[in-house]
């Protein structure tokens, strides 16, 4: 393991000019291309096999619609029953952990890399990663951006187009840029089979 890879995995500042990181990037490029180019009519087992090779951990019943893009893949763990819609970008310089039964809308970005505010350090190529974590049953509306170091608690819903820059607790609705909690989502929330005017609108 090269020094920059060691520093990256420790969450320290590193420079991405490391032979092992370059090899990991090439691996990701090839596997993502295979996944994204596999026709949807192909047996699902073939696509699932590519995902298991690309990602660090994939639970049963995970569905990811192509195109899908990531940095390394091996730092991404996805729980059972999770659905990821078209155009997802998961930059996994640091671990991205996604719980079970998560719903991720189209064009969602989960971003772990961050760069120095100091211009000279940034010009020199330094960066580091801060983990992103989504709890079970989270729903991210289309176009949501989750920034480095953010944890979103279980059962929380984030409205479409929101930018999440700080942790969100469990069981809330958050919207906006930056995303702010607008209300709690209790166990009595309306669901299928209840009057249409009580069903929450798609965020």
Image (spheres, rainbow, N blue to C red):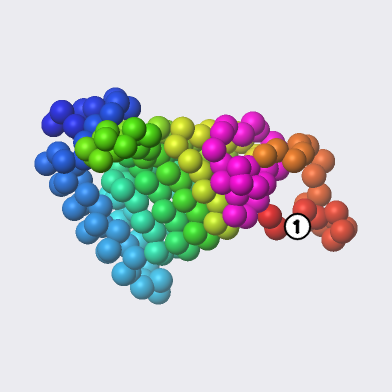
Q: Nearer the viewer, residue 112 or 84?
A: 112
Apparent side of residue 82 relative to residue 168 in the rendered image (left or right): left
Quarter of the picture holding the C terminus = bottom right
Give the overall secondary structure of the magenta segment.
loop
Q: Quadrant of the N terminus?
A: top left
Residue placed most toward the observer, 153 or 164: 164
Q: Residue at x 24, y 32 (%)?
A: 14
Q: Is residue 7 visible?
A: yes
Q: Residues within 10 Å of mark 1 (few under 14, many from 20)?
A: few
Is 7 on the left or on the right of 83, as rendered?
left
Instruction: State which region is magenta.
Output: 158-179
Residue in the image at 53% along x and 33% along y: 151
Q: Position of residue 6 (x, y in %)?
A: 21, 28
Q: Secondary structure at mark 1?
A: loop
Residue visible at 28% across and 29% down in the picture: 13
Q: Nearer the viewer, residue 80 or 137?
A: 137
Residue 15 lies in the magenta stretch: no
Q: Was residue 169 drawn as part of the magenta stretch in this picture?
A: yes
Instruction: Specify the quadrant of the image occupied by residue 9.
Output: top left
Residue 163, percent across and down? Answer: 56, 46
Does 101 sit above or below residue 7?
Answer: below
* Residue at x 31% of width, y 37% of height: 119
Left or right: residue 158 versus residue 188 is left
Tell me, yes or no, if residue 48 can be seen here: no
Relative depth, front residue between 37 and 89: 89
Q: How many marks?
A: 1
Q: Is residue 177 above or below residue 97?
A: below
Kindly identify which residue carries mark 1.
201
């Amino acid at each position: 393991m090269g020094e920059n890879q060691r520093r990256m995995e420790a969450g320290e500042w590193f420079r991405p000019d490391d032979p092992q990181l370059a090899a990991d990037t090439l691996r990701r490029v090839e596997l993502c291309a295979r996944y994204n180019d596999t026709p949807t009519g192909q047996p699902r087992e073939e696509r699932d096999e590519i995902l298991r090779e690309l990602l660090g951990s994939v639970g049963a019943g995970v569905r990811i619609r192509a195109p899908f893009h990531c940095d390394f893949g091996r730092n991404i763990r996805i729980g059972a029953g999770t659905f990821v819609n078209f155009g997802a970008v998961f930059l996994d310089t640091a671990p991205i952990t996604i719980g079970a039964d998560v719903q991720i809308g189209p064009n969602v970005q989960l971003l772990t890399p961050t760069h120095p505010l100091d211009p000279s350090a940034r010009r020199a190529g330094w960066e580091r990663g801060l983990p992103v974590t989504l709890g079970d049953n989270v729903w991210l509306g289309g176009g949501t951006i989750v920034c480095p170091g953010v944890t979103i608690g279980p059962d929380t819903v984030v409205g479409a187009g929101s930018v999440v820059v700080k942790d969100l607790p469990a069981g809330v609705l958050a919207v906006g840029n930056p995303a702010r909690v607008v209300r709690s989502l209790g166990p009595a929330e309306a669901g299928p089979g209840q009057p249409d005017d009580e069903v929450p609108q798609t965020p």
